[in-house]
Amino acid sequence: MGLRDDLHARFGEVPDVPDRSAADVLAPLAGRASCRDFADRPVDPGLVRLLCAVALSAPSKSDLQQRDIIVIEDEAVRAALDELLREQPWIAAAPAFVMICGNNRRQRQIHGMRARPFPNDHLDAFFNAAVDAAIALAAFVTAAEAVGLGCCPVSSVRDRAEEVSDLLGLPDHVFPVAGLALGRPAGEAVISPRLPLSVTVHVDRFDDGDLEARIGDYDKRRAAAQPYETQRMPAEYGHDPSYGWSEDKARQYSRPQRTGFGAFVRAKGFDLG
């Protein structure tokens, strides 16, 4: 498939493509898909380290460089991590795993080294580090897929944030943002349709008018291309014959999730005021 086909599969529409050279460059990005089915082939540790370098070449907020990557190589550590994430058994089959962390500790250490005050001990200290880590995560995914690897971010590490932190020896002001499972794909990943651009791209001012109708159209388009095999929490909500993305996400977040993450972040020394 080419860029136009991938964008149509993704959004149900095709933005203007200015020229062929742009199409060739952008097609792999538009056609990407998360991989949860890996071939039983190891990933060269040298390649993983190279990908770390490329990921950390991505933009950094204010050049503060508040993100670190922990490469999981020790078999015992990996086994313990897989056990913490056992509700997603596909993770254990990934040949390689890295943890992307936000790091506001180093900035504080630099202030100590330079004998300068640290007056910004508030929410933005956490937010800056979290965003910096997210930028590196996106760059890592792009780099990994460019060299033929498949990967999938793992946000469920935050479900067990304290245990993950203890396992990896994360000190105060360093916290897990997401894991990343990677390896050679065992098969072809499927493009997930996304919300239409009319919902997520705005010009000049935010506008979510007519949202219900647009989400309804998206539910139908996604169900036609990628129907859900099961429905969440049928005992609580019953069986919905028109079950789609919006119902799935509403059910998913109808239960409390990561309610202890704020306490974990505060215990790491962050003042979120």
Image: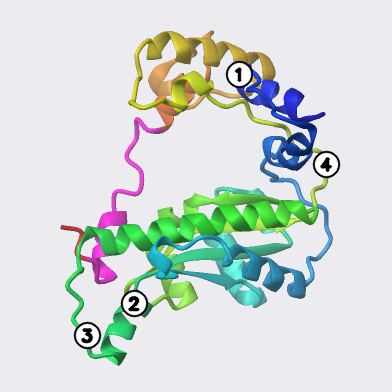
Observer-nearest of 128 and 90: 128
Q: Give the residue pinned by disc 2.
A: 107
Magenta span: 253-270
**Residue 82: which quarter of the image?**
bottom right
Tell me whether circle 4 and circle 2 mark residues in contact (CB < 8 Å): no
The amino acid sitting under disc 3 is Arg
Mark 3 or mark 4: whose residue is earlier in sequence: 3
Residue 64 x/y as whole percent? 40, 70
Three-letter amino acid code of the residue under disc 4 = Gly
Q: Is residue 32 left or right of residue 86?
A: right
Q: Is 184 drawn above or below residue 69 in the view shown?
A: above
Measuring from the top left, give residue 8's x and y in whole percent. Answer: 68, 20
Q: Residues within 10 Å of mark 3 (few under 14, many from 20)?
A: few
Position in image of residue 77 (x %, y %): 58, 74
Dot 4: element = loop
Q: Which mark is residue 187?
A: 4
Dot 2: within a 10 Å radius of its alpha carbon, few (fewer than 14), some, or many (20 or more) residues? some
Residue designated by label 1: 222
What residue is shown with label 3? 116
Q: Is residue 234 visible?
A: no
User: Is 261 included in the stretch rendered in magenta?
Assistant: yes
Measure the alpha-carbon separation of dots 3 and 4: 53 Å
Lower sequence index among marks 3 and 2? 2
Task: Indicate the quadrant containing the C terminus: top left, top right, bottom left or bottom right.
Answer: bottom left
